[in-house]
Amino acid sequence: MSLPISRTRDLAIRRAESAPQRAFAAIGLVALVLPLLLLLFLFGSSLVDAWPRLDWSFLTSFPSRKPESAGILPALVGTTCLMGLTAVIAIPVGLGAALYLEEYARPSRLTALIELNIGTLAGVPSILYGLLGLEVFARVLGMGRSLLAGACTLALLLLPMVIMASREALRTVPPSLREASYALGADKWRTLRGVVLPMCLPGVLTGVILSLARAIGETAPLITIGALTYVAFLPDSVHSEFTALPIQIFNWVSRPQAGFHVNAAAGIIVLVALMLLLNGVAIWLRARLQRRIYW
């Protein structure tokens, strides 16, 4: 008779111990589902409002004072050029800084101070980067309200995230691979170029593309440096004035006409589609590069 009683006691103890775990899992599930439902509701309501304007003419037309004929072509081209130029500036600088801090820098007070500042800058509000870009790039360096000034400002915003993502990717490479390369006679640079960088490239690219997906929706830095809200031309150089999708959406939302609010909802859908496209590219690149490395 003692065996069934002991089993019953053990089951009761296990149930009592698992009750907090089940409660914590339920709280975590609610915390996951509620934001997703809110996001789906907001996206669905925007899609319903934007559906009458989501056509090819909306993507290929210039802004207009008439909401039914206004389009987002300059904003779409400006956003594409801005993200491309931002990536050209931020990726080499961020990856180079990560390589130096992770592979070459010796532990010291200066290195610790740099790492502390990088972690702090990652949490600085974007409006402060806009003020910095306005003073340094637009005024001191004389770039004005150009595409290059906007790209440099967004590159400053992305640099902490690119550096941290690159350093985390570099740490995933096993030390045994470095030691095997050294044993074959390769120096440090050849080891980094031929072994470390190809192994950590999926993580680096994923972090960079996700950072760009965040920057594509930033409005405050662009407004601060003076990006235009109404542009009836396409940028023809890095010194040209420009607009971007968040600026165009902000301009339409501030208009009193209901037609411009429909255009703003359509612009939001296009912006969300671009962000999802960038995230999809990041996932695809990561999977493809990982298969190439391990196979």
Image (cartoon, helix red, strand yellow):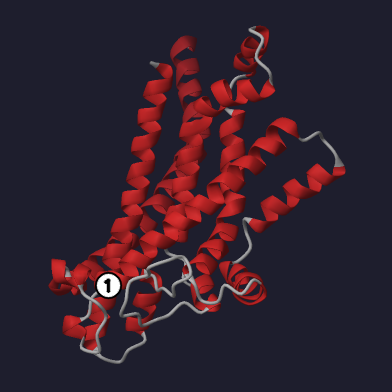
Q: Nearer the viewer, residue 5 or 88?
A: 88
Q: Is residue 146 left or right of residue 30?
A: right
Q: Nearer the viewer, residue 10 or 201?
A: 201
- The residue lying at 56 percent from left, 33 percent from top is 169
- The residue lying at 63 percent from left, 7 percent from top is 184
Check the image and report above or below for 96 versus 15.
below
Percent coordinates x, y for residue 203 in the rendering = 49, 35
Residue projecting furthest to the bottom: 256
Percent coordinates x, y for residue 139 in the rendering = 63, 77
Check the image and report above or below for 277 versus 153.
above
Q: Is residue 33 left or right of residue 188?
A: left
Q: Quadrant of residue 261?
A: bottom left
The quadrant of the picture occupied by the C terminus is: top left
Percent coordinates x, y for residue 161 in the rendering = 57, 50
Q: Secondary structure at mark 1?
A: loop
Percent coordinates x, y for residue 196 in the rendering = 57, 25
Q: Quadrant of residue 217?
A: bottom left
- The residue lying at 41 percent from left, 73 percent from top is 242
Task: State whether residue 216 appears in this view.
Answer: no
Q: What residue does disc 1 label?
A: 72
Residue projecting furthest to the right: 109
What is the total number of numbered labels drawn onto the structure image? 1
**Amino acid type, label 1:** Ile
Task: State whether residue 45 appears in this view.
Answer: yes
Q: Is residue 43 left or right of residue 111?
A: left
Quick one: label 1, few (<14), some, or many (20+) residues within 10 Å? many
- The residue lying at 70 percent from left, 31 percent from top is 103
The quadrant of the picture occupied by the N terminus is: top left
